Amino acid sequence: MSIQAHALWGHRWGIPTKSMGASMLTDAEARKALARQRDYKLSDAGGLHLFVTTKGHKSWRLKYRFGGKERRLVLGSYPDLSLKKARELREEAKRALREGRDPGLESKRARHSRAVGHENTFEQFAREWHASQVARWKPVHADDVLTSMVQNLFPEIGGYPVDQIDEALLLAALRKVEGRGAIETAHRLRQRAERVFKFATSSGAKNMNPAGNVADALKPVPPKKRRPALTDIAKLREFLRDVDRAAASPVTRLASRLLALTAQRPGMVREMLWTEIEGIDWSRPDEPSPDALWRVPAAKMKQELDLREDHTFEHIVPLAEASVETLRAVRPFSDGRGLVFPGGRESTKPMSENAIGYLYNREGWKGRHVPHGWRSSFSTIMNGRSERTHPGAERLLIDRLIIDLMLAHAPSGMSHTELVYNRQAYMERRRELAQEWANLLLEEADPVAALTEGRRRRVER
């Protein structure tokens, strides 16, 4: 840039220049500058000058005007910061002034960013975000969220400051997960990363949030396969007999029977507590319990996050007499305290989430029926019976609604208010359907007392 151009630029943007015709500073002059009795400066151009102290320390400084006031900015020490680099920093200051930004403030921000860069990492914000959300999640889900990031994202991008992570870096981490065939996991990780970046932004750490731009670069999630489920009542009875007579823990067999009778989610049955059971007089085993029910707290329900803290969304399961008998049979195994179906090693932990499924597989039903399949069995068979029993459209629609409510499904088209009301409604009909299902299922079953015997041998037929 010519001296005239420097003069014009300095006049326009508030950075002084040398007088016309003056030569700019050379590196040799900067190198030979020695200490004097007083601090002094050697001017270059555009407000840039070398400041030399009485002790011989040299630093590049920039004089400029911003907001009508004269300001100075220390760029760095010489010779660590060369003359060439000092001039480049002056040009950056010129761009900042042109955009209406104070170069001094920009420099302070950069220094702060470098100072805290090791703190503003993805892993730091991910853990803070997780801690802020964990109270809203089920423990199993909370553990899955953190574990998935610890195993897949932290090793790849966890140590980077969030403002240094771009699309290419994040996508490379997600592609490694895809490479293992975990397509759905990769998509879940992208969603979690996006929330972490948003959380970082709300905490004052600017970033590009690259997660929003890489969604289309990931492989599409394959359609979910339907869980295997038997829907023929005769086959279900045969299956139930096989399981009841299997060489397995009595607690596992009884858990399987209650799962079949209630058609609830397997996780809910595993984590079932004795305090959630109402309407049963345990001291009178021969008395019927027409009002028995299982009250599942809202926190355990698989619902949207904004409903989990709403106590009106607890799930009430009416218990048929066969369900009550099953609970009476399993009660001695835990003394009626804590978990209904405790694990074999620790009574304070629920039975393994795979225990029932492994039992089904060992009995030769792998790929034909899974623990979650009881929900499809109940829905298919009871909806079919309702259609045959109540051909009228209104009665049929009501029964379909009730069956959905029994499965803790939110019927489509139902408003929030209707959902709250209907979860408490139709209890009489819900009890009727629960009892009808139990009668159908157990028509040829062994008595529940037989399931409490040690590890039974399978009866060959």
Image (cartoon, rainbow, N blue to C red):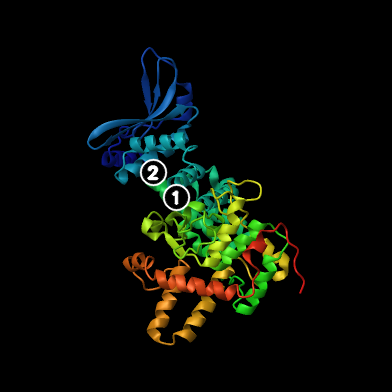
- Whether 146 is drawn above or below 6: the answer is below
Of the 4 image quadrants, the one containing the N terminus is: top left
Total number of numbered discs in the rendering: 2
- Whether 387 is drawn above or below 459: the answer is below
Q: Residue at x 60, y 58 (%)?
A: 329
Mark nearer the N terminus (1 vs 2): 1
Of the 4 image quadrants, the one containing the C terminus is: bottom right
> Where does label 1 land, which residue?
197
Q: Residue at x 58, y 62 (%)?
A: 326
Secondary-structure class at tag 1: helix
As rendered, which of 219 and 10 lies closer to the eye? 219
Residue 29 position by quadrant: top left
Tell me the CA gap for discs 1 and 2.
10 Å
The amino acid type, in three-letter code, at marker 2 is Ser
Q: Position of residue 77 (x, y in %)?
A: 45, 27
Q: Position of residue 343 (x, y in %)?
A: 63, 51
Secondary-structure class at tag 2: loop
Q: In the picture provided, is 192 more to the left or to the right than 66?
A: right
> Where does label 2 land, which residue?
203
The answer to whether residue 404 shows anywhere in this view is no
As rendered, which of 317 and 185 lies closer to the eye? 317
Q: Position of residue 279 (x, y in %)?
A: 45, 59
Q: Residues within 10 Å of mark 1 (few under 14, many from 20)?
A: many
Res. 376 mark? none
Q: Residue at x 48, y 58 (%)?
A: 280
The amino acid type, in three-letter code, at marker 1 is Phe
Q: In the picture provided, is 62 more to the left or to the right than 296?
A: left
As rendered, which of 405 and 189 lies closer to the eye? 405
Q: Position of residue 363 (x, y in %)?
A: 72, 67
Q: In the picture provided, is 202 more to the left or to the right than 271?
A: left
